[in-house]
Amino acid sequence: MSLVLAADYRVPDFDHWWAAIARDLATLPGLGVHIVVVYRSLQDANRVFVTIGVRERGPVDALLRSPIMFAWFDSAGVDEIPPIFVGQIVEKLNLDPDTLEARPGVRRFWIYRALDDQAEVMVLQEIATERQAEQWIRHPDAAASFMAEAGVGAYPPLFVGRLVQTIKLPVT
């Protein structure tokens, strides 16, 4: 079963970081990485959210301690390695876009369960426009009341961003 690693962090210089990522991509397939998805915050141009898909569940601690993973953050210029969510997909939902035209709403949901805590989940939502995303955050429906608790404790605040790129890597 595949894994997802996700991290929300600030980089000192987005353009420098993006160039470094391009150089480092060739090292990732050796760790089983098959996809990297990068988002950039709408509110803070140097804040990024990155998900990394790993094909097979192996020893997670070995993956996280890999020199390649440390080099990934070193090349980004971050001072401290951010908390990394490690989990497995629970559900992917694609909602009918025709029902969402009249009101702002979520088009897709991805739900992941953490490997180290079965009660912890990460939810990713795709919304059609920035305006709709802002409306959704200000006025979530009752089912999304959990959003008010984001940013408490070790958990990062809500991340609202734009997709920069989805990078599919070759299988090694």
Image (cartoon, rainbow, N blue to C red):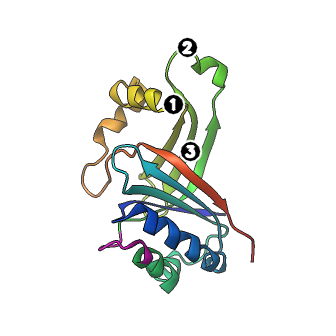
Give the x, y percent position of residue 52. Answer: 56, 63
**Mark 3 residue type:** Trp
Residue topped by disc 2 = 102
> Which one is in front in this view, the residue at disc 3 or the one at disc 2?
2
- Mark 2: give few (<14), some (14-19) or many (20+) Cα within 10 Å: few
Furthest toward the top, the residue is 102
Please name whichever residue, 171 or 143, is drawn nearer the observer in this view of the structure. Answer: 171
Residue topped by disc 3 = 110
Q: Are marks 3 and 1 in contact (CB under 8 Å)?
A: no
Residue topped by disc 1 = 129
**Mark 1 residue type:** Thr
Give the x, y percent position of residue 25. Answer: 60, 73
Residue found 74% across the figure and 70% down from its top: 170
Q: Is residue 121 above or below residue 100?
A: below
Residue found 56% across the figure and 76% down from its top: 24
Give SS at disc 1.
Answer: loop
Give SS at disc 3.
Answer: strand
| Magenta highlight on residue 129 | no
Q: CA distance from mark 1 to mark 2?
A: 13 Å
Q: Earlier in the sequence, mark 1 or mark 2?
A: 2
In the image, 3: left or right of 83? right
Furthest toward the front, the residue is 15
Quadrant of the image for the C terminus? bottom right
Give the x, y percent position of residue 119. Answer: 42, 52
Q: Which residues are magenta?
A: 75-81
Q: Earlier in the sequence, mark 3 or mark 2?
A: 2
Give SS at disc 2.
Answer: loop
Q: Earlier in the sequence, mark 3 or mark 1?
A: 3
